Image (cartoon, helix red, strand yellow):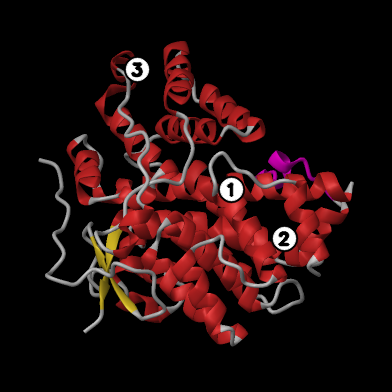
């Protein structure tokens, strides 16, 4: 499979930056293996590929970087997603993208660093299209992307109550958190690539 | 019938950033050590990690755990050139400080302090946050890590330029990008699947 980070960052095979990345061969290989474990799993189990790419398209959209956003929307389209689902993802990104990281600390000396921000709930229209299970995942993903320090058990319980198994909650958490990594590596390497070109 | 989250045992939560050793208590049910399947054990990479609730929980999804662990190790432990270990740890600590992961910051602040011997500077980062003055080279690394951690991502040519001027070569800059980006992964798992607790 194509090296997705190189693809998204526009790094050509054999270029100086491509060779520099080879100095961290295991990181490179396993960043790719991480992508494949999440998006081309041996068995998707009860967390379908369409759900995986729907969450990914939403999360990539929230990060606002054109290259990764388009990639995951295309992947979602490739799963046979309905036009309604594609519209719902795009409109939820539009409704809920904001600035982070924000959130609260345990009461104490750090309280003065608390910062409030959007507590996102999927719109009624999109909830109808996404269904309760995916809508709950979008709400959890939004918290992970913008204000992870606000995380608390009720958000996980909401996932479990919406029909996610504990193992699928772990996989979803990995998927959103992996994207937080991948999108930043791509953004960073893209800047580096533009400079060394 | 849906599954239930866990209520952690009575504990004292840390309310400041610290270099102290902390515990981590899971909000979701990890497999016990005895319940781990051979594949789950293998996915831990280090056998000793079977003692950790955090890694046992992540072992529920073994393929992504193993790939993530091997990515992590190369970013931080590969000794071949690039940024010194202390500076990769600094990027991890700064990212954790900005995202607000008290547990992750404690681990990587300890590592940064041990490898750099600059305990006062590390403590200044923990106390004051990512705008603390730590000298130009460390400021450049912390500023680049903070820009990558911000959403929308704020990292631009000016950060690369500042890192270069501070003496980091291409591979060292890749190491900083990798380390800060990786902790945007780690922080989110640590913050959202359980909570830190003071030891003792």
Position of residue B66 measured from the top left corner of the image (x, y, whole percent): 48, 63
Position of residue B199 measured from the top left corner of the image (x, y, whole percent): 25, 81
Q: Is A7 covered by the magenta stretch?
A: yes
Viewer-proximal residue among B183 and B16: B16
The kind of secondary structure element at disc 2 is helix
Residue of label 3: A126
Viewer-proximal residue among A109 and A84: A109
Viewer-proximal residue among A16 and B2: A16
Image position of A177 with respect to A127: above or below: below
Residue of label 1: A182
Q: Residues within 10 Å of mark 3 (few under 14, many from 20)?
A: some
Viewer-proximal residue among B72 and B93: B93
Please provide the residue range marked out in magenta: A1-13
Chain ID, mark 2:
B
Image position of B84 with respect to A93: above or below: below
Q: Residue at x 77, y 40 (%)?
A: A10
Same-chain status of marks 1 and 3: yes
Position of residue A184 measured from the top left corner of the image (x, y, whole percent): 61, 48
Image position of B112 with respect to A66: above or below: below
Q: Is B6 covered by the magenta stretch?
A: no
Residue B176 appears in which quarter of the rendering? bottom right
Position of residue B173 measured from the top left corner of the image (x, y, whole percent): 74, 62
- The Cα atoms of the two marked residues, 1 and 3, are separated by 27 Å
Chain ID, mark 1:
A
Most distant residue in the right direction: A197
Does residue B1 appear anywhere in the picture?
yes
Where the N terminus of chain B falls, by quadrant? top left
Query: How many marks on residues?
Result: 3
User: Any mark on residue B174, and which?
Assistant: 2
Chain ID, mark 3:
A
- The Cα atoms of the two marked residues, 2 and 3, are separated by 39 Å
């Amino acid at each position: 499979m194509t090296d997705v980070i190189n693809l998204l960052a526009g790094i050509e095979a054999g270029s100086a930056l491509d060779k520099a990345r080879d100095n961290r061969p295991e990181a490179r290989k396993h960043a790719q293996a991480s992508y494949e474990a999440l998006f081309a799993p041996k068995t998707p189990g009860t967390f379908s590929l369409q759900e995986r790419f729907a969450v990914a398209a939403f999360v990539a959209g929230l990060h606002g970087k054109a290259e990764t956003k388009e990639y995951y929307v295309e992947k979602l389209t490739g799963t046979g997603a309905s036009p309604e689902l594609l519209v719902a993802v795009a409109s939820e990104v539009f409704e809920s993208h904001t600035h982070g990281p924000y959130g609260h600390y345990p009461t104490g000396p750090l309280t003065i660093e608390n910062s409030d921000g959007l507590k996102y709930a999927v719109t009624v229209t999109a909830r109808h299209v996404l269904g309760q299970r995916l809508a709950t995942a979008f709400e959890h993903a939004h918290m992970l992307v913008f204000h992870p320090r606000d995380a608390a058990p009720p958000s996980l319980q909401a996932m479990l109550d919406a029909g996610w198994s504990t193992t699928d909650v772990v996989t979803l958490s990995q998927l959103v958190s992996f994207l937080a990594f991948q999108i930043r590596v791509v953004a960073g390497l893209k800047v580096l690539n533009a400079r060394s070109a | 019938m849906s599954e239930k989250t866990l209520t952690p045992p009575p504990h004292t939560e840390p309310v400041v950033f610290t270099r102290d050793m902390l515990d981590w208590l899971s909000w979701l049910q990890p497999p016990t050590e005895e319940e781990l399947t051979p594949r789950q054990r293998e996915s831990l990479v280090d056998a000793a990690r079977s003692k950790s609730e955090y890694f046992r929980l992540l072992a529920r999804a073994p393929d992504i755990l193993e790939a993530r662990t091997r990515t992590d190790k190369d970013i931080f432990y590969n000794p071949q050139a690039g940024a010194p270990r202390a500076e990769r740890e600094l990027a991890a600590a700064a990212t954790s400080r900005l995202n607000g992961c008290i547990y992750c910051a404690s681990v990587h602040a300890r590592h940064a302090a041990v490898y750099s011997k600059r305990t006062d500077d590390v403590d200044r980062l923990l106390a004051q946050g990512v705008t603390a003055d730590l000298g130009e080279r460390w400021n450049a690394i912390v500023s680049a890590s903070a820009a990558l951690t911000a959403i929308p991502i704020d990292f631009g040519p000016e950060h690369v330029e500042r890192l270069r001027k501070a003496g980091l070569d291409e591979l060292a800059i890749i190491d900083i990008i990798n380390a800060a980006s990786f902790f945007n992964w780690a922080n989110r798992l640590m913050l959202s699947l359980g909570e830190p607790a003071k030891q003792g």
